[in-house]
Image (cartoon, rainbow, N blue to C red):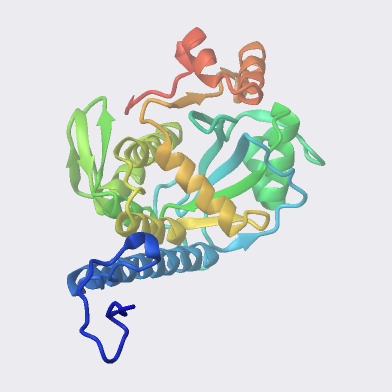
Amino acid sequence: MTDTPRGTDPGGPARLTDPDPAAGAQPPVKRPRRGKRIAVLSGLGVLVLFGAAVAAGFLAVNHLVSRVPRVSVGQLPASGGAQTILITGAGFGATGGPSPASAAEFSGLIMLMHVNASQKAGAVVSIPPMVVVPVPGKGDTELENALAAGGPTLLVRAVEQLTHVPINHYARIDFDHVSQVINALGGVDVTMLKPGASIGYKFHAGVNELNGVTAIYYVRDRSVSNADRILRQQNLMRAILSKVASRHLLTTPVKMYRVLDAVTSMLTVSSNFTNSELMSLVKELSSLDGKAGTFVTAPSHQAGKKVLLDRPASGQLWRAITDDSVAAFARQDPQTVTPVAVP
């Protein structure tokens, strides 16, 4: 019997055979190429840097919002889907001159800014400061007297009593700093009915492009009446809000930081306004389409030496705020729409 030589037999010649996969032999392992490893690591690095940038951006924005001064305005109801903010103005008085350094004077601006529950539309309702209304503890007096007598707390109570609209927050705009916002936005446009001049600067009839300095000239014009000056304040705020909404200027981190840096310098808000709520509000305003904002003024009339609200129409307006239907109200009562072109 003759033995057949095997490949494992030390004395016999080795026989070359093809590997049999079925016999459990493993295919050779391919090492990843160096270029692929570098690409993967680079991608991870980009993700890490992006995450760090987002975190740093959030911290920077949170810092800006944290520096906004807070004031106590009593007990304000928490906002649900919709929210209403009472806004007043400061920075100059009835003469249109600059305010004293020691205290910011009331500018005459009283507005309710309402964001609908859908967060896809909103309204700004201006209330003439001279209207005579019941003020808690003061009887029938001009609405602006509530602010002078009891600060924002009494004004909030008076407006809530008047409108039956729950006010969730309060904010005061200092027009001494509004120029920074306008410069950060790259200017705003306002429309004038006729030519005019203020502090040596000439405005022309039609659309005027304002920068930070000329915007202050616009709202501090001493040649116009108090009522027209308040209209200009309203118009300037509309121009700012419309610019933010229509151009989506808060959608990039750099622009958002610049605008927020300017906005926070002009704001004072109620103490119940948290940082996250302020940032959410800015995001909501920046996401609104330019045509999604409705600007109206509560209808009023002169009765002797008093200014009184038109009760039936104003009552409908207050209900429209509560029902998120100010746009529909404006279509039905177009004379209440705050004019775009003002004296």
Query: Seen in the image, is 142 located left or right of residue 75?
Result: left
Q: Residue at x 20, y 74 (%)?
A: 16
Query: Seen in the image, is 170 located left or right of residue 187?
Result: right
- The correct choice, above or below, for 187 with respect to 208 in the image is below
> Where in the figure is residue 202, as x and y percent of width and height?
17, 41
| Image quarter (top left, top right, bottom left or bottom right) of the N terminus | bottom left
> Where in the figure is residue 55, as x and y percent of width and height?
45, 67
The furthest residue to the right: 137
- Among the 4 quarters of the image, the one containing residue 248: top left
The reply to whether residue 217 is in sight is yes
The furthest residue to the top: 332
Query: Seen in the image, is 186 located left or right of residue 282?
Result: left
| Image quarter (top left, top right, bottom left or bottom right) of the C terminus | top left
Q: Nearer the viewer, residue 262 or 203?
A: 262
Q: Residue at x 23, y 69 (%)?
A: 17
Q: Nearer the viewer, residue 164 or 299?
A: 164
> Where in the figure is residue 323, as x and y percent of width and height?
64, 21
> Where in the figure is residue 48, as x and y percent of width and height?
37, 70
- The correct choice, above or below, for 44 with respect to 174 in the image is below
The reply to whether residue 233 is in sight is no
- Among the 4 quarters of the image, the one containing residue 246: top left
Q: Nearer the viewer, residue 297 or 292?
A: 292
Q: Residue at x 66, y 29 (%)?
A: 132
- Among the 4 quarters of the image, the one containing residue 118: top right
Query: Seen in the image, is 39 located left or right of residue 1?
Result: left
The furthest residue to the bottom: 11
Q: Residue at x 35, y 42 (%)?
A: 244
- Number of numbered tags placed on the structure image: 0
